[in-house]
Image (cartoon, rainbow, N blue to C red):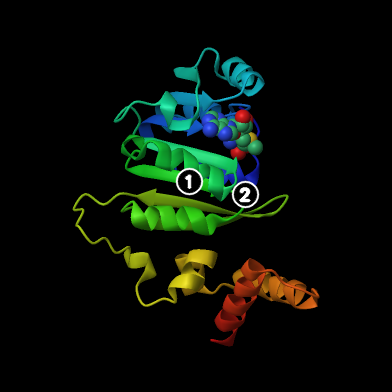
Amino acid sequence: MPHLDQRLKIVARQVRCGTHADIGSDHGHLLKALLASGRIERGIAIENKVQPYANSQATLAGFNAEVRLADGLAGLASGEADCLSICGMGGESIVRILDAYPDRVPDTAIFQPNRKPELVRAWALRSQYNLVDETIAHGHWRYVILRFERPGNRQQTHEDPAYDGLDRDAALLFGPHQLRHRTSEFLTALREEQAYLTSLNRLGEEAANRLAVITRILAE
Ligand SMILES: C[S@@+](CC[C@H](N)C(=O)[O-])C[C@H]1O[C@@H](n2cnc3c(N)ncnc32)[C@H](O)[C@@H]1O
């Protein structure tokens, strides 16, 4: 069994389906662990670079998996996978991949953005997915793992219940479930970021907005 760091272990625990596609599979360890543990029946690894593609092929040899050299969802047909993961990329890249072929995103999707998770949460709101789970993994950084489900009874105006009654800017930036549960770990992370941002001489617009939102959350 390949070693998964805490981040990918949390992602793996969120997956149980027939066919799972992993975009940016790199070493291929996530799909190998999912196949070896029986959490999925078939895996599709998608890579857009030659060496990671070769690494995925080597890791997944002998498993019920296909490794494809393609740019994101260009390598997946609509309806081919039941579940999708994209891990270890920035929020901008994840959203670029999703927006390129919106009809190819399965009903269950798990993302681990290295930064700017708010872009992924905003994508889900405009694409009619509900954010059903938000888990923090501690590794090199503090990572958030987001699991989305597309509800069966989609309406013209979609409202994700996870955001009900919450400050929308704060929930997009820091996560509606995090905001609702206000764990001591979450509040400590906010206090640390607040202290860091306050110590800086000048803040750009984005950092100033984060500081204002953090201050609002901590004042509640
Ligand atoms: C930092 S690695 C993360 C690997 C693994 N998912 C993880 O979380 O440990 C990102 C991988 O995504 C791949 N990648 C980036 N953009 C991609 C795209 N548009 N389509 C497919 N793969 C992509 C890169 O080649 C790289 O192997």
As drawn, is 57 to the left or to the right of 130?
right
- Picture coordinates of residue 112 (x, y %)? 55, 47
Q: What is the secondary structure assignment of the residue under circle 1?
A: helix
Q: What is the secondary structure assignment of the residue under circle 2?
A: loop
Q: Is residue 79 visible?
A: yes
As drawn, is 87 to the left or to the right of 141?
left
Q: Is residue 13 visible?
A: no
State the residue position of label 2: 114
As drawn, is 125 to the left or to the right of 35?
left
Disc 2 under 8 Å from ligand 1? The reply is yes
Crowding around mark 1 (Cα neighbors within 10 Å: few <14, some 14 to 19, many 20+) is some
Above/below status of 24 relative to 11: above
Residue type for callout 2: Asn
Rounded to the nearest angstrom, the CA distance separating label 1 from label 2 is 13 Å
Asked which quadrant contains residue 19, the reply is: top left
Of labels 1 and 2, the one closer to you: 1
State the residue position of label 1: 95
Asked which quadrant contains residue 185, the reply is: bottom right
Q: Residue at x 65, y 41 (%)?
A: 5
Above/below status of 153 relative to 17: below
Q: Residue at x 80, y 76 (%)?
A: 199
Crowding around mark 2 (Cα neighbors within 10 Å: few <14, some 14 to 19, many 20+) is some
Observer-nearest of 89 and 29: 89
Q: Which numbered disc flags the more N-terminal residue, 1 or 2?
A: 1
Asked which quadrant contains residue 28, the reply is: top right
- Picture coordinates of residue 1 (x, y %)? 61, 27
- Picture coordinates of residue 58 (x, y %)? 61, 15
Above/below status of 57 relative to 98: above
Residue pushed farthest bottom? Answer: 219
